[in-house]
Image (tube, rainbow, N blue to C red):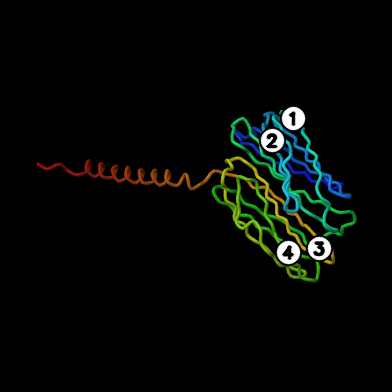
Amino acid sequence: MPRAAIALLVGAVAAGTALAELRVEGESQVADGVSLRVRATNTAPEAVRDVVPEVVYRHRTVVADRVDLIEGGAVHEWRTNLPAPPGPGTFPVTIRLRYADRDGPARPALLVHLIRTPGAPPPDVQATIATEPVSRMGQAVVTLENAAADQVAGRLVVALPDDLRTDPESRAVEVVGSGRVSLPIVVENVGARPGDVRPIFAVFEYDRDGTHHAVLGEATLAVVGSRSALRPLLIGLGALAVALTILALAVRRARARPSAG
């Protein structure tokens, strides 16, 4: 049974303590169709409210039932049935959870899960992601490495939670035989709060010898306060310091000057 899990920090951080934290897991079985189970575990003491899971698979979106409340330490599961894959191989499912914590605004969680048909061969391509902290903007680098002697051509899709964004989300990519390619990804913060830790997933899909392959890379992005917000304050303090220094020198010179008469 294929299974994927990632711990996502999906709440604000105050004094280093998470207000809400979900661990999102996906399990699937493939037969005549796909049986998918999504599990959300609230590992923090604060409850989360109005949790709505959305599953995207082969350009089809399924919205599961909304859960009013998941208490701290509690677990909730959803089960859904999806169509069978069109052929042998590995296929991605994107799972998005939206919820509210005690601060009120909607918050996102995200997981990309791979569905594997029985006997599907492993891919020749591996994907990794290197990240840097995100303030207003940030950057990640996706590296694809091809172990096969032949060139691979496919499509790379970058998945981010709703409060982060990249453009384009999808692009055509070619990787030479026994080679690698590194692709920079610009990440824009459109709602994440300083202290949040957000996931980033990169899915590279390609076909070879009648098999569809989906290669998954995953990492996390730390959200930090914008340094640019401090720049005007620092400039102002610097100007004030210069003005006070000039004033002090002027007063000192005036005192040292001999008086006339």
First in sequence: mark 4 or mark 3?
A: 3
Q: Nearer the viewer, residue 75 or 91?
A: 91
Q: Which residue is mark 3?
A: 124
Instruction: Give the residue pinned by disc 4.
Output: 154
Residue sitting at 82 percent across and 54 percent down? 85
Q: CA distance from mark 4 to mark 3?
A: 13 Å
Along the line of sight, the residue nearer the viewer: 222 or 104: 104
Label 3 to label 2: alpha-carbon separation: 37 Å
Q: Can you tell which quarter of the image residue 55 is in? A: top right
Q: Is residue 167 above or below residue 190?
A: below
* Residue 186 spot, x, y in % from top left: 59, 56
* Residue 61: assigned label: none
Amino acid of disc 1? Gly
- Depth check, mark 4 against mark 3: the one in front is 4
Q: Check contact, mark 1 vs mark 3: CB within 8 A.
A: no
Kindly indicate whether the residue at mark 2 contacts the one at mark 3 (C-beta within 8 angstroms): no
Between marks 2 and 1, how big is the CA–CA gap? 15 Å
Q: Which residue appears at 77% of the width and 32% of the height?
A: 75
Q: Earlier in the sequence, mark 4 or mark 2?
A: 2
Q: Circle 1 is placed at which residue position?
A: 73
Q: Is disc 2 surrounded by few (<14), some (14 to 19) or many (20+) residues within 10 Å? A: many
- On the image, which quarter does residue 42 sit in? top right
Secondary structure type for disc 1: loop
- For the residue marked with disc 3, what is the amino acid? Asp
The residue shown at (71%, 37%) is: 22
Label 4 element class: strand
| Residue density around tag 3, few if under 14, some if 14–19, many if 20 or more, within 10 Å | some
Q: Label 2 amino acid? A: Val
Along the polypeptide, which appears first: circle 2 or circle 1?
2
